[in-house]
Amino acid sequence: MANPLQDQLLKAGLVKPHQIKKATKEKRQAQRGNAPDAVAEQARQAQQHKAESDRSRNREQMAERERKAQAAQIRQLIETQRLARSGGDSTFQFVDAGKIKKIVLHKAQRAQIISGVLAVVRFDQAYELVPAATAEKIAQRDPGCVVVRNVPSSQENPETDPYADYPVPDDLMW
């Protein structure tokens, strides 16, 4: 069906039939030429959006894998380096997440925790004793796992300490 305006112009003799055909052909080519560009643009935008979502998903997956790998390393360190504390006769109390917790251990182990030789770490809803070097490795991976780690201060010099004559007992139970 032809355009009524074109029909009127043709009847009035203002245009010739080949001019109408040429105009409709140009119009179709213009529409056809623009349509692929619009479709291509939409396809390109969809591809960019998909690529961005894939990248973000990959980043999340990599972070999750890294977190799981660190958890596995911590688990392995604790399982291989933990010290047995069965049959203990002394308790050691400490604060974890705002709550006072208590573990039973030997007096020698308690003294080693206080002096900084041993540390207490959280492991599978329980607490374990590990050497201070292992606790340092665990703290590098996840500082939240190390609950008690006393670092001996090298600043205390018994010769210059004015309170060296007044020892403070470390064996107080609270």
Image: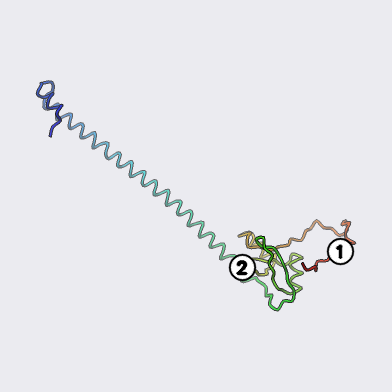
Image marks 1 and 2: residues in contact by CB distance under 8 Å: no
Which of 126 and 130 lies nearest the eye of the viewer? 126
Q: Position of residue 55 (x, y in %)?
A: 44, 51
In the picture of the structure, the residue carrying the numbered disc 2 is 123
Which of 7 and 140 lies nearest the eye of the viewer? 7
Mark 1 surroundings within 10 Å by alpha-carbon count, few (fewer than 14), some (14 through 19), many (20 or more): few
Q: Which residue in the rendered view is the most extreme toward the right?
A: 165
First in residue order: circle 1 vs circle 2: 2
Instruction: Reply above or below: 103 against 154.
Output: below
| Residue at the (72%, 76%) spot, across then down | 88
Mark 2 surroundings within 10 Å by alpha-carbon count, few (fewer than 14), some (14 through 19), many (20 or more): some
In the picture of the structure, the residue carrying the numbered disc 1 is 167
| Residue at the (46%, 51%) spot, across then down | 56
In this rendering, would 113 be left or right of 6? right
Indicate the quadrant containing the N terminus: top left, top right, bottom left or bottom right.
Answer: top left
Amino acid under disc 2 = Phe
Q: Position of residue 82 (x, y in %)?
A: 65, 71
Amino acid under disc 1 = Pro
Instruction: Reply above or below: 94 against 33.
Output: below
Q: Secondary structure at mark 1?
A: loop
Q: Which mark is residue 159?
A: none
* Quadrant of the rendered image containing residue 84: bottom right
Q: Position of residue 52 (x, y in %)?
A: 42, 48
Q: Position of residue 159 (x, y in %)?
A: 88, 58
